[in-house]
Amino acid sequence: MIKKTGKAKFMEALRLLTIAVFAFGLGACQQSSSIPDQDFNKDWLFFKGEYEKAEKADLDDSAWRKLNLPHDWAIEGPFSNENNARTGGLPVHGTGWYRKHFQVEEKFSDKEIAIEFDGAMNNAHVWVNGEFAGNRPYGYIGFELNITPFIKFGEDNVIAVRLSPEDLSARWYPGAGIYRNVRIKINNKLHIPQWGTKIRTPHITEKNASVEITTSVCNQSKSQQTAKLETILIDAKGNEVCTTNSDIIIQAETTGYVDQKMNIENPLKWDLETPHLYKAVSNIYLKGKLIDRFETNFGVRSIQFSSEHGFQLNGRTVKLNGVCMHHDLGPLGAAVNYRATERQMQIMKSMGVNALRTSHNPPSPEILQICDKLGIVVQVEAFDEWQMGKVPNGYNKYFDQWHEKDLRDMIKRDRNHPSVIMWSIGNEILEQSRKDGWKIAKKLTDICHDEDSTRPSTAGFNYYPAPFTNKLAKYVDIVGMNYWPLNYTEILEKNPDMIVYGSETSSQTSSRGVYHFPIEAKEKHETNQVSSYDVTVGPPWAYPPDVEFEQQEKETRSLGEFMWTGFDYLGEPTPYGGKDNSTNGYWNADWPSRSSYFAPVDLCGFPKDRYFLYQSQWTKKPMVHVLPHWNWENKTGDTIPVMAYTNCDEVELFVNGKSYGKKVKGVDLTPIPAEFHFFEKGTYYSKYRLSWNVPYHAGELKVVGYQNGKKQAEKTIKTAGKPYQIKLIADRSNIKADAMDLSFISVRVEDKDGNLCPKANDLINFTVDGKGSIAAVGNGDATSTEPYQANYRNAFNGLCLLIVKSTDKAGKIRITASSNGLQAQEIVLNTKK
Ligand code: GAL
């Protein structure tokens, strides 16, 4: 690897900054000294482990590994049962150092220089040229450091970041490293600071929307400044819809706040199906010269909550069909990637999801941009712990010192997103059981109100009735209940002023494409896989999705639910967990289980059967799904339970052309062995599934969905022959040549006729040539310890996934997948600038 000389790096930085200023000057059509924030992700150096004096400016770091951010060192593996499986069986702990050499031109010596991290996992300590610049323990929170005093303008500078994530710092996979984006800001002394705008739309009619904007203006100079703040509102097509100007005077070394009121005529509202966005451009002029420009996306929409009408968006009741999600991106780990996040949310939307809970921490900025764009409402959650810890090295260590800043910063960063509808101050906080637990709840809710008067606070309570007797429920605006579906009505009746919803529901588990006979509930299977009949093998509090559907229908006052979880995530492989003395009796897994089984979609984004159960309840476009697969070679003549999920009125089942009769949804019920906690040992009858018991004969299983007697949907599963060929299906064949964009390629093992071989586990080898490389591979098997960063993967029940990343050069990416005894396949992707 050739290390760039100081001069070469200086020239590169000079070019970048010069272009940026010039480009902006042109765009603004007037003289400008405003400099857009610069991407600061490229060309970092990394060392995994302790390193003496690594913060020093003169350290010889030439042998360190070169990489670009965002980076998650833990996802590089290896998997090991030495690492706690609860956090993914990956090396999420230890020390990691990052360094970057950079220049800031001499001509900027009168500017203010800041570095903004969207999050660093965790315990970040930052030095610039050997001087300590600041620290931030919470890995999920974005922070900015003013590094002006340490910068040597026109010379080589070095920033050093030490991260020291501890073992058992979370109940899931946190990732490790500078896993979110970083940027450098070069500001004039007078400028709009980080998160410097607050936009509200208090009155909305069809004809008009009033827009109130509070803009912070920071004056870091030693003298009072008289300037002008111009705010321009721009619609999604780029048309200016309103402009206003304010003369401002800001005292030396202070931050002032400017209130402006504007109007949008005939506003295009932000809604789930039409997520229209606007942009506010805030310009500061000093002596007629543009010196700062700040952009904020926002939407025109109203939200209301009441137990009478539930959650209302733009005056219309919307039942929350929500999912909880952890932040990892499966095989890509925690390193933020826009496309991977967008794909996750698109898959969720296709299942019928309209709401997301960012369990249990502040999300990446990207996820909120994506929810703004796709029309998904979001509950942003701050904490999983307050003062009482759940894991040996949890956030409780930092709560007293940092909670106020972390919570305020979370709200400041996210409060302009139209998608955000609630602030959650905590999940299953152990202080629920404390008589004085309400004091912290009150303090946190007060902070939420102080930072944002337009959205309610909430929390996810899992005890009942403790948070009510201990008054925590009184000190949130909206009460979220985790896993108490049968108690919504009682809670509402005892507390008529409260608004309630299921903040966490179901926790059903399953493995994609796995079926165990007879239909089982509760027992753990020796394969460490969970049957996809979805009748609850999970933690004691879990129950099938059907139970929640039923209660949500019955209790119309409930706002809806956030099911646990939308996507499988790394870590927490319940039910394959237990006690382990090496962690003080603390939870550990039955190795090699190392990622969750909870979701209707596996870690790779492949739907399990449960995806279709949610789709049948949450979507309207006619669909029907049938399970299990139809390859039971040793069971000819045996009875096989078949289930169908549909949003049609009735379904007819055919086996090899023979009808097994029509069943009517809601009338023909499916018995479920009810061993979940509130149905001790009874049978639960689901009106959300249709089922038949049929003798197995190889051939074809077909379901037809009818609406008002008319055929509206059908699905057929055929008995597959021997594995014969590999089929590659790219989610996108044209991607951006920006070294970030991804193509997700589903890899199918098929028989001669193109049927998926539902038990195939062939080892597939990949070659990727041209303008791309392998970002990761995966297969959705929660017990696989194969590396994610590799050029091979075993299929799991017929499928695996190849994720390919572009380079910054446009051209073609040639991908080949081969396997012993299978016909190989090649596909070509295009990348464009
Ligand atoms: C909840 C908890 C989640 C997850 C889930 C698994 O109690 O809030 O973080 O652990 O259980 O069922």
Image (cartoon, rainbow, N blue to C red):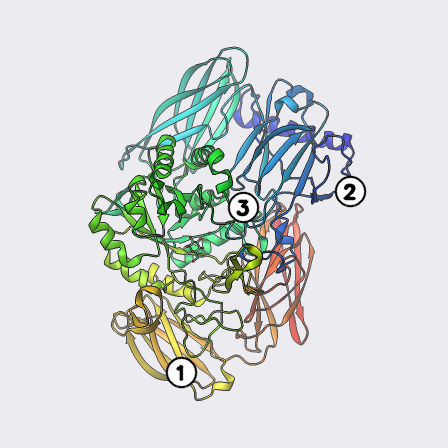
Q: How crowded is mark 2: few (under 14 residues within 10 Å), some or many (20 or more)?
A: few
Residue shown at 40% from the left, 44% from the top = 426
**On residue 655, which mark appears?**
1
Q: Where is residue 244 in the image (x, y as percent from the top left)?
A: 39, 22
Q: Position of residue 228 (x, y in %)?
A: 45, 17
For badge 1, the amino acid type reads Val
Residue labelled 3 has its Cβ within 8 Å of some atom of ligand 1: no
Q: Position of residue 268 (x, y in %)?
A: 34, 39
Residue 36 in sight from this viewpoint = no
Q: In which quarter of the image is residue 447?
A: top left
Q: Which quadrant contains ligand 1?
A: bottom left
Q: Residues within 10 Å of mark 3 (few under 14, many from 20)?
A: some
Q: In this view, does 752 lie to the left or right of 195?
A: right
**On residue 63, which mark appears?**
2
Q: Position of residue 765 (x, y in %)?
A: 67, 66
- Viewer-nearest of labels 1 and 2? 2
Q: Name the residue under label 3.
A: 393
Q: Which comes before the other along the chain, label 3 or label 1?
A: 3
Q: Which comes before the other along the chain, label 1 or label 2?
A: 2
Q: What element carries label 2?
A: loop
For badge 2, the amino acid type reads Ala
